[in-house]
Image: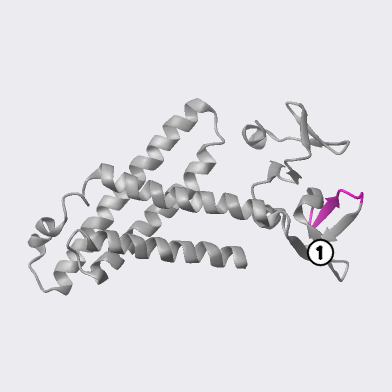
Amino acid sequence: MKRILIIVLYWIAAILLTAFLVVSLDYQFWQGLMIGLMFLPCAMALSFFLPKVAKEPAKDRIKHSLFIILGVMALALFLLIVTHMLFSYIKNEPAYSFPQDIAPILANPVFLAIILTILAYGEFRLEKWLGKTQKNHPVSFTSDYRKVSLNAEDILYIESRDSEVWIHTRDGKSYRNKTGISQWENLLGPDFIRIHRAFLVNGQDAVSTSPDTVTVAGTELPVSRKYKNSIK
């Protein structure tokens, strides 16, 4: 919950800073806020999709990154036009006057790309920092009707067995839990790597022993084709 709150506060601060930047281009503050809100989904799309593309092979990575950037830029320009049309409507001006109201630098694709990149990269670095601090914080869950608290770094791997998930720890213990493995993946952060639909491993303890297996503390686990790129 604290992690989500920090990220929400980051985006609120990002919108306000963007609004002040837009105000310096002779916009009113309320207009700056609306443009900042317009940038929000575009920057979030970049910060969400680009790290996922980074796990792909180099050839696909370049192609897919280009598609994502072009798509986000097209979305940003479209939202910019719609926002200025809304400004014209609010100010009771003719709809055709809105193109003249757009500050030239704001409609510059390079300027837009710089702003969106800064916002997305800031969120990406914040996520990385939260991931590093999170691993030393206790993770609480229920196992066999009792509450258990563990440091994330003490977990070796998570194993999904049908309707149950087993948490295997560094001291040789295993805990049964009902939380889905995908939720564990989000909870534990980037230090844990998905290698199979049924296995999530601590990246600090995983050793790739073959193209199809990973060993964690002497236990050999399978790697599915879907997750081989993330293992690399």
Q: Position of residue 229 (x, y in %)?
A: 62, 32
- Highlighted range, magenta: 160-172
Q: Position of residue 32 (x, y in %)?
A: 27, 65
Q: Residue furthest right?
A: 172
Question: Is 168 within the magenta?
Answer: yes
Total numbered badges shown on the rendered structure: 1
Q: Amino acid at mark 1?
A: Ser
**Is residue 120 placed above or below 220 in the rendered structure?**
below
Q: Nearer the viewer, residue 94 or 30?
A: 30
**Is residue 12 placed above or below 225 in the rendered structure?**
below
- Side (left or right) of 42 relative to 81: right
- Side (left or right) of 207 relative to 219: left
Q: Residue at x 56, y 53 (%)?
A: 127
Question: Is 70 within the magenta?
Answer: no
**What kind of element bears circle 1?**
strand
Q: Main secondary structure of the magenta part?
A: strand
- Side (left or right) of 225 relative to 26: right
Q: Residue at x 81, y 51 (%)?
A: 154
Q: Residues within 10 Å of mark 1 (few under 14, many from 20)?
A: few
Q: Position of residue 203 (x, y in %)?
A: 72, 41
Q: Which residue is mark 1?
A: 149
Q: Residue at x 66, y 55 (%)?
A: 133
Whether residue 186 appears in this view of the structure is: yes
